[in-house]
Image (spheres, helix red, strand yellow):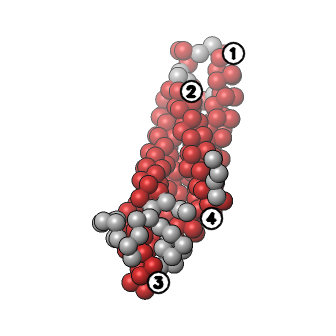
Amino acid sequence: MELTNREFWTFVHGMVLGSMFLLAFTGGLAGLYSLRPEWLTSEGLRERMTRLRWGISAMAVIAWATVLTGTWIVYPWYRESLAGEESAGCEGLQAPSETCSPRDFLLSNVSGDTESWHTFGMEWKEHVAWIAPMLATAAAFVTVYYGRSLAQSPFLRRLVLWLFAGAFVVAGIAGLFGALITKTAPIT
C-alpha cells in the first residue's frame, strides 16, 4: 500500500493523532474519576497523580498537534480553488480531482446536495475545533497546578472533568465531520 504525501498527512492528522487523543482521553477520564481520597492510599495517590499529570498534559499536546497539522498542513489542500468560475472544473466528476479541490467539489453540488458539508462541517472544523486544545490545556494546567488537591476537592475534580469532557466533545464532533467530509470529498 502506498500513500501520497497528502494521504500520509491526512492519515497522521486524523487517524494517528486523533486515535492518540481518544486513548489519552480514556485514560485521563478513568484516572480523574477514580481520584477520590477514600479509594486511594498515600502511595497510590502519588502514583496516580504522576500518571495523571503526564497523561493529561500529553492529551493537551496531542490536541494541539492535531489542530495545527489540520490547519497548516491538511486544510490548505482542502481549500485550494481549482474549479474556476461557476465550478466548471467539477462538472461531471464523482470525486475531487486535479481540476476540482475537495472544497470546490462540495460547493459545486455535482454529486448531490453537498454544500452544507462545507458551510457547516468545515466551518466547525476550521473555527470551533480550536476550542478542544484550549480546554485540554486548561484541564492540564489545573491538574498540574493543584496536583494532590484534586483528590480532596470535588469541585476542582469536577472542573477538570468538565474541561476534559468539553475538549473530547468538541474534538469528537470535529473528527466526525472530518471523517464524513473526507468520505464525501477526499483530499487526493
Question: What residue does disc 4 label?
Answer: 72
The residue positioned 59% from the left and 62% from the top of the image is 74
Q: Quadrant of residue 37?
A: top right
Mark 1 vs mark 3: in front = 3
Tell me if 20 is positioned left or right of 110 in this view.
right
Mark 4 vs mark 3: in front = 3
Query: Mark 3: which amino acid?
Result: Gly
Q: Quadrant of residue 50?
A: top right
Element under disc 2: helix
Query: Mark 4: which amino acid?
Result: Trp
Which mark, residue 31? 2
The span from disc 2 to disc 3 (Cα, nearest Å) is 52 Å
Element under disc 1: helix
The residue positioned 57% from the left and 68% from the top of the image is 77
Query: Mark 2: which amino acid?
Result: Gly
Mark before the other along the chain sequence, 2 or 3:
2
Mark before the other along the chain sequence, 1 or 4:
1
Question: What residue does disc 1 label?
Answer: 43
The span from disc 1 to disc 4 (Cα, nearest Å) is 44 Å
Residue 95 to residue 61: above or below: below
Mark 3 neighbour density, 10 Å: few (under 14) some (14–19) many (20 or more): few
Mark before the other along the chain sequence, 4 or 2:
2
The residue positioned 55% from the left and 63% from the top of the image is 188
Q: Name the spot of residue 18 as percent of width and height, x first.
A: 56, 45
Mark 4 neighbour density, 10 Å: few (under 14) some (14–19) many (20 or more): few
Question: What residue does disc 3 label?
Answer: 84
The span from disc 2 to disc 1 (Cα, nearest Å) is 15 Å
Mark before the other along the chain sequence, 4 or 3:
4
Q: Name the spot of residue 155 as percent of width and height, x first.
A: 48, 34
